[in-house]
Image (cartoon, rainbow, N blue to C red):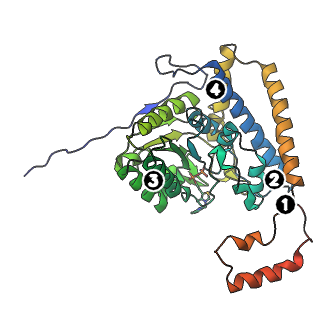
Amino acid sequence: MARTKIASFSIEYLQVMDEHGEIDEHLMPQISQAMILKMLRTMLYSRKFDEKMLSLQRQGRIGTIPQGKGQEACSVGAVACMNLDDIIFPSYREWAALIWRGVPLKYVFMNFSGDERGNSADFNYRVFPFNIPIATHMPHAVGVALGMKLKKKNRVVACFLGDGTTSEGDFHESMNFAGVFKVPCVFICQNNQYAISTPTKKQTASETFAQKGIAYGMPCLRVDGNDVFAVYVAVQEAIARARRGEGPTFIEAYTYRLCDHTTSDDAKRYRSDEEFRAWEKKDPLLRLKAFAEKRNLWTKSDEEKFLGEVEGKIDQQVEEFETMPMPDFEDMFKYMFAEMTGPQKEQLNYIKQFKGKYHGHT
Ligand SMILES: Cc1ncc(C[n+]2csc(CCOP(=O)(O)OP(=O)(O)O)c2C)c(N)n1
């Protein structure tokens, strides 16, 4: 008989760069200047794209949208250390990852206008479509990772999710499967401290989200999610482990959404001004910019020039989106089942009378 401790755990926290752009040289990963600039440009691009999305939504030119403002370092730090044939399962705020991979952003406009063709971007980008039902992408991510393992492809999957997503059944099933079958999947949980208006303390009784990885037998840690270098280090180590056949990793990136949940939300109703302002100072973009400016890698005029180019690119995507032909009415019914059911055929016949009467995406 015995009463002894049979297991004990601890959770590591990693920050490489503080909110003033100062780094710990010992923790700093080896990254080329070109890569650092690509990270900065992608974060700036993503922020600009966010502004454009909001403006289009306010003008009624696209539907309800989420924004990614404040969480860009989580995406960019992660995708920066992946190979281009590694696979991304984004969350619905992940423009920065899409921009990194070069996915045409008109697909995002389509997605948030109810046009299913938004999910049909060329798979050569290795980016799966957004999933609005939370956690539903996780079993797919784990399945794809298992496929990569079985086919000995040496490719890794990055699966992005939010803190609220950890309460879903799909989350637990996926984590369990990933742990048991040691699939090459890196889970990046962006803990932005709220699931719409639900704060983390009402989401979980765990001290950290990171420790959820322990229950499923995978390495896990918490990083400063507003520090692009910390995310990079953690994901790079996780990817290396996955490629060695050592299975998945769970990373909690501690961050903050510097915007409403979506354009249907008013975050002022559940977050104080004081809290918001404190997090504005920790903005991941300002932090990386401060780092780059101190090292003379980036100047204000570089930024003006870059943002001018980006605006042109985004406007072109808007133009392409707004001038493309509308999808066929039948598409709504065609892909549900191999053959349309009786009620579907009836609905299709009914809707045909409206064909040609509506134009544009809204
Ligand atoms: C299965 C499912 N249930 C409920 C919702 C409604 N919903 C939309 S976003 C959201 C909160 C998600 O929070 P989190 O995972 O932390 O991601 P965040 O939006 O903060 O990035 C909920 C509950 C949904 N989209 N899908």
Residue occupied by mark 2 = 57
Q: Nearer the viewer, residue 329 or 131?
A: 329
Q: Nearer the viewer, residue 139 or 53?
A: 139
Q: Are marks 1 and 2 in contact (CB under 8 Å)?
A: no
Residue occupied by mark 4 = 287
Residue 311 in sight from this viewpoint:
yes
* Image spot of residue 351 (x, y percent): 82, 78
Residue 224 - label = none
Mark 1 close to ligand 1, CB under 8 Å: no
Q: Residues within 10 Å of mark 4 (few under 14, many from 20)?
A: many
Q: Secondary structure at mark 1?
A: loop
Residue occupied by mark 3 = 204
Distance in Å between CA atoms under marks 3 and 4: 30 Å
* Image spot of residue 213 (x, y percent): 40, 46
Residue occupied by mark 1 = 361
Mark 3 close to ligand 1, CB under 8 Å: no
Q: Residues within 10 Å of mark 2 (few under 14, many from 20)?
A: some
Position of the C terminus by quadrant: bottom right
